Image (cartoon, rainbow, N blue to C red):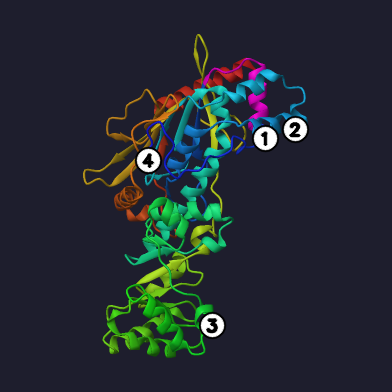
Amino acid sequence: MGHGSEKRAGAARMSGLATDLYQLTMAAAYHASRRNERASFELFIRKLPDERSYLIVAGLEQALDYLVDLNFREDEIEYVRSLPVFKSVGEEFFDYLRKFRFSGEVWAIPEGTIVFAGEPLLRVTAPLIEAQMVETFLLATINFQTLIATKAARIVEAARGRGIIEFGARRCHSFGAAIYAARAAFIGGCIGTSNVEAGRMFGIPVYGTAAHSFTMAFDREIDAFRAYYNLFPESTTLLLDTYDTIIGAHLATEFGPQLRAVRLDSGDLVELSKQVRAILDGAGMGETKILASGDLNEFKIAEMLERGAQIDLFGVGTELSTSRDAPALGGVYKLVEVEYADRLEPKMKLSRDKATYPYRKQVWRESANDGTFEEDIIAIVAEVIERGEPLLMPVMRDGEVIGSMPGLGEMQDYARQQLAHLPVQFKKNENAAAYPVHYSSELERKRVELLKEFECGK
């Protein structure tokens, strides 16, 4: 999945208009005011959703694809020109859009890393107009994939080593969302997806069974089973509950130990799994797996396993691919510094409940000798935290990606290692402790100084 200076193979061009209107109106106003100093913005999550104690970063690769390829076609420029709000905007701005390319630098926390509220996941430093214009797409991309990767990790944690397959394409908010939900879910620990296009684009293993309609299309259930198995003898998973699950399980024994799996999709999955397991084992089919699906989530899976469910794999759709219990992530993108000709000026927002910290920042993670995460410190970039490891890494310079991105499997392995280093009290799916994240004393001191200067300048 190398980038270099070229767009990744298979990545579709995103329109220059993939943004909010106010990004374009601000760009026009900056341009008219001759304001295009180099500026730095940081993307962070203001507050973790309920029952979330950590996040897993995802979406960086698509963010970089967008920045590398960002431009405006003539028809897009003509559309902007046609909007009534731009009637007073001079031709110079539209000429600027014709030549527009992202030329800045980006520092980011790698995909698969565990992060927490307040920590910059990504920092953009570029001419002010460029840095401003990319806000909407970066937020949409990082917010969504981070949300889904985190939900996947929670479900995988609940499954205690049993495989989770992402099944959610039909319930996503669009098929475009479904593709990137599958990608993020894989980073979060899923073993595969039902989404064939996501499999093609990202090399994710694809899984599937057959629908109830396939069974219903045949006169007899066993005829449906035979038709499917005869064509796919090495990969068949038989759906047992179209009519009667227990009868379906007995019919499945005809295929012997070569049958890969059976699927349960309704009823009391715990009790049915126990009965089906006994039927399969009695027929010498101990290696045939039981897959369960049907509006599952981390809480239901944990409860089922506590009750002794004999389930080997879980297919999780709606709850995973929409993160139904927490369907949005409150990521924001805020200005932190502007470089004028004669000075570097820190910027911060003072709004009630939405205040921000100034200066470009680095996140440092302190760990115990065994690698266990202990504490994160958010500091000014010039600071060095002796016991810490810096999380933000340079990924783009002069509008070109530095090096190459890791493969998706590497991202998944990295996320798994990260979770292994997070103490259990901080990753429980319910009533988890809050992981300690602090601002450095130097950053706190400088922020107080800026507040005093602001008060004096009122």
330 to 157, vertically: above or below:
above
- Of callouts 4 and 2, which one flags the residue occurring earlier in the amino acid sequence? 2
Q: Disc 2 vs disc 1: Cβ atoms closer than 8 Å?
A: yes
- Of callouts 1 and 3, which one flags the residue occurring earlier in the amino acid sequence? 1
| Quarter in which the C terminus is drawn | top right
Question: Residue 436 occupies which quadrant of the picture?
Answer: top left
Label 1: which residue? Answer: 21
In this rendering, the label closer to the viewer, 1 or 4: 1
Give the amino acid type for the residue marked by disc 3 in the picture: Ala
Give the amino acid type for the residue marked by disc 4 in the picture: Pro
Query: SS for tag 1?
Result: helix
Magenta extent: 23-38
Q: Is the magenta stretch mostly helix, strand or loop?
A: helix
In this rendering, the label closer to the viewer, 3 or 4: 3
- Residue at the far left in the pictured view: 369
Give the amino acid type for the residue marked by disc 2 in the picture: Leu
Of the pair 453 and 77, the residue shown nearer to us: 77
In this rendering, the label closer to the viewer, 4 or 2: 2
Quick one: label 3, few (<14), some, or many (20+) residues within 10 Å? Answer: few
